[in-house]
Image (cartoon, grey):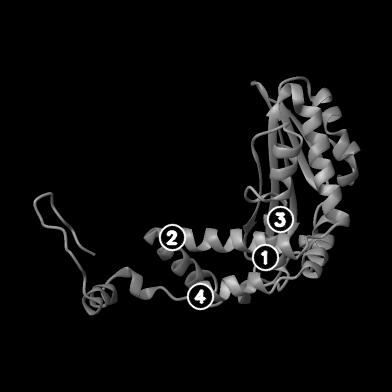
Amino acid sequence: IYTLSLHDPLPISVAHDELCAHLEDSPFAGLTSRPAEARYAERAFDSPRLQPASGELAALRIDGQQTHVGLTVLTPARDDPRRPAVHVAAAVLGAGVSSRMFQGIREKYGVGYNVFAGVDQFGPAGVLQLGASAPASRARHLMTAVAEELGAFDVMPPDEAELGRATGYLRGAILLGYDDPMVRMGRLGRHLLERGEIITVEESIERLRRVRAADVADAWELIVAQGWNTVVAGPGRERGLRKLASPLARHINDVGRAR
C-alpha cells in the first residue's frame, strides 16, 4: 500500500478511512469469504473416506543420544462440538507443568525432560499429538511411563481441579498470545477466510470453560478407539526400537504392521 524509502519518515498512525480507501483500489478488494465449513463435504468420523487409519508403529534409526517417541491420533472437525473437549484433554495430558505427563514422566519418574501434547486443527479434521524424549539409556522407562499415563487417562478422566488447571492454561496461552499484533492479525484473517466470521476471544474461552469431565471422556473414547499412530526414533537398530515400544502395544491396534 505504501512505499517508503530509507529517508521517508515512518507514519505514526494511519487513519481507518484512508486505509480502507487504499484497499478499495488494491487487489485485496476482490477477496471474498464464506464459511469454509460449507465447503467441507467430508468430516472426520463421518465420512467413509476420512475413516481413521488403524494404529501403526514405525521405528526410525537416528544418530544421537536421545530416544524420542511421538504419538498421533485423528480428532474431530473444526466445527464439531466435541473439539473443545479434545483441546482440554490434550492440555490435561501434556500441556504445561501441571499436566499429567509433565508431572509423571518428569517429576515422578524423572526419566525424561521434554514432554508435550497439543492439537493441530484443520477444517475437516484435527490431529492430537503427544511427544516425549529421554536419554537412550532410559528409553524403556520412558515408554513405560508414557504407556502408564495413557492407560490412566483411559480409565480416569480429569477431575474438576484438573479441568480448571487445563482450561486456565489454555486461556492464558490465548490471552498471552493475543499481546502480539501479528497473532491478532493472523487470527482475524484466519477466521474470516476459513469461517466467514470472527469468533471472539471471549467466546473461544467460554467454549473451553463449558467442557466437563464427561465431555472429555466421551471425546477421548472416540479418538483413541482407532489406536495411536506411533513413531519411535533413536540410536540402535529398528528391531530394537520396536521392542522398546512394547509397553505401548496395548495402545496400538496392530503392532505387527510396524514398518
The reply to whether the C-beta atoms of the residues labelled 2 and 1 are less than 8 Å apart is no
Give the secondary structure at mark 1. loop
Looking at the rendered structure, the kind of residue marked 4 is Thr
Is residue 54 at least partly visible in the picture? Answer: no
How would you rate the neighbour count of disc 2 (Cα within 10 Å): few for under 14, some for 14-19, many for 20 or more?
some
Looking at the rendered structure, the kind of residue marked 3 is Val
Q: Which residue is mark 4?
A: 200
The earlier-in-sequence mark between 3 and 1 is: 3
Give the secondary structure at mark 4. loop
Residue at image position (70%, 53%) is 128
Is residue 234 at least partly visible in the picture? Answer: yes
Give the secondary structure at mark 3. helix
Which image quarter is the N terminus in?
bottom left
Disc number for residue 124? 1
Taking 49 as reference, is 124 left or right? left
The earlier-in-sequence mark between 4 and 2 is: 2
The reply to whether the C-beta atoms of the residues labelled 2 and 3 are less than 8 Å apart is no
Q: Which residue is mark 3?
A: 92
The earlier-in-sequence mark between 4 and 1 is: 1
Disc number for residue 234? none
Residue at image position (78%, 67%) is 213
The earlier-in-sequence mark between 2 and 3 is: 3
Residue at image position (82%, 60%) is 157
The earlier-in-sequence mark between 2 and 1 is: 1
Q: Which residue is mark 2?
A: 183
Taking 259 as reference, is 208 left or right? left
Q: Position of residue 231 (x, y in %)?
A: 74, 37
Q: Nearer the viewer, residue 63 or 204?
A: 204
How would you rate the neighbour count of disc 3 (Cα within 10 Å): few for under 14, some for 14-19, many for 20 or more?
many
How would you rate the neighbour count of disc 1 (Cα within 10 Å): few for under 14, some for 14-19, many for 20 or more?
many
